[in-house]
Image (spheres, rainbow, N blue to C red):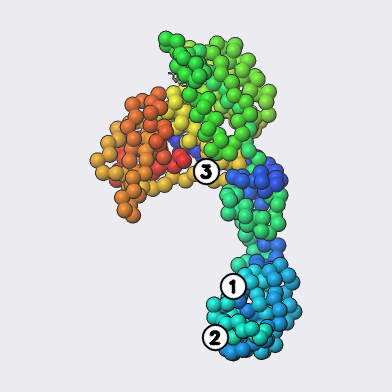
Amino acid sequence: MITVADLWTRLDALARPLPGERVPLASAHGRILHEPILAPEDQPPFDRSAIDGYLVHVEQPAGLAVLEGTIQPGSPAPAFAPSPGTAYRVLTGSALPPEKAALIMQEDTKATDTGRVHLLQPPSTKHIRRRGSQARAGDMLLSSGQILNAGALALLASVGATTPLVSRPARVAHLVTGGELVSPDTTPAQGQIRDSNSTLIAALLRDTGAALIWQQRVSDSRTATADALTAALATNADVILVSGGASVGDHDHTGALLAAQGFTIHYDKVASRPGKPFIAASRDGRLAFGLPGNPLSHFVCFHLFVKRVLARLAGTEPSALVRAKLAPRAELRPDPRETWWPCVWADEGATRRVLPLPWRDSSDLTVLGAAEGLLRVPATAGAGAEVEVLPCR
Ligand code: AMP
Ligand code: MG
């Protein structure tokens, strides 16, 4: 059985970044940048005032100066600084002449009613926002692989990069198998259960920025499952997820049906608890995964493997494991398989501690809403005082 770490390495090799696309800024939120963004000109592009006050010559002493006019923000800068003895009114953002300029804050002046201004102290240059003080033309503002959050989008807007080259959201088709499953808005008959994995996967995909383009639930019949898989493959999905039927029971058709469709089955088990029956398959660059139907296994397999693959397809790094101290008295059952244990952060002062949540078995949904991470409990040895956590929020 392949270990989780070895499967990561294999998945990283299988999941090649999808080609990017150019989109308007309004559609770029949360996408991964696929090109470096260089400053097209110095930032700021011209010297400008950081204050409301007066522009004077750099050698202007304290005392009276004749007011010559106002430089409105948005107007071109005067070519020269005012001559000594004169001043211009400036506002925050007013463009300033490139040389010999100095500023004085309004609070450090007194206006007279004779068209003059009284400078109560010598002016200075410290309130000038200098051209190029933030970045020089050609400097890298954003690097390829960076996620476009609100701040990054604002930076793009400020330099006029309005159609950045970004990741295309991976298209995902999700096939849910299980004759026992009914829609969540139905009252299950004796022996039936509500399908929660459809909702789980739809929400997790939304969190990761992938596009769920097709989702269908089928009974366990082999022909019905085969037909539904054919329909999933007829879409232009980059990734096919199959819930349930990933193990070796009479109704577990996922592996056989993927193989019949020409997929190479790379792995059908991984040494993880929960989440052992996990199928990883590919055909001509298209990826398919069979996830065990139990909801907690589903959650764990998505975070350990599917999310990683989606990050790679988007051209970014998957979430890194975070080192943390285990909360005192935490009880963790070690197992021959590596365990990924739902947990929450329990910070104590400056120390980041991690608190395992109680869970019964791989069908236990009760902890999913609270889980902030998955705590790695190494196989056999169990956890020491220092542990690793895969964040899942
Ligand atoms: P399977 O992987 O198909 O053998 O399913 C394992 C367990 O997970 C069974 O108890 C199923 O009833 C349950 N299960 C499978 N699919 C779902 C689903 N979509 N929602 C909730 N539970 C499920
Ligand atoms: Mg099943």
**Residue 186, how many percent across, how many down?**
49, 16
Tag 2, which secondary structure? loop
Q: Please report the residue visible at 34 percent of the width from the left and 29 percent of the height from the top.
A: 359
Residue type at mark 2: give it: Leu
Which residue is identified by label 3? 318
Q: Please report the residue visible at 56 percent of the width from the left and 16 percent of the height from the top.
A: 218
Q: Which mark is residue 253?
A: none
Residue 118 in view in this figure: yes
**Residue 387, how many percent across, how many down?**
35, 44
Indicate which disc, 1 or 3, sits on the residue closer to the N terminus.
1
Above or below for 151 versus 10: below
Which residue is identified by label 1? 51
Q: Please report the residue visible at 52 percent of the width from the left and 43 percent of the height from the top.
A: 318
Tag 3, which secondary structure? loop
Mark pair 2, 1: CA separation: 16 Å
Dot in front, 2 or 1: 2
Which residue is identified by label 2? 120
Above or below for 371 versus 57: above
**Residue 188, how many percent across, how many down?**
46, 13
**Residue 100, how many percent across, how many down?**
66, 84
Q: Is mark 3 within 8 Å of ligand 1?
A: no
Pointer 1 and pointer 3: residues touching (CB < 8 Å)? no
Mark pair 2, 3: CA separation: 58 Å
Indicate which disc, 2 or 1, sits on the residue closer to the N terminus.
1
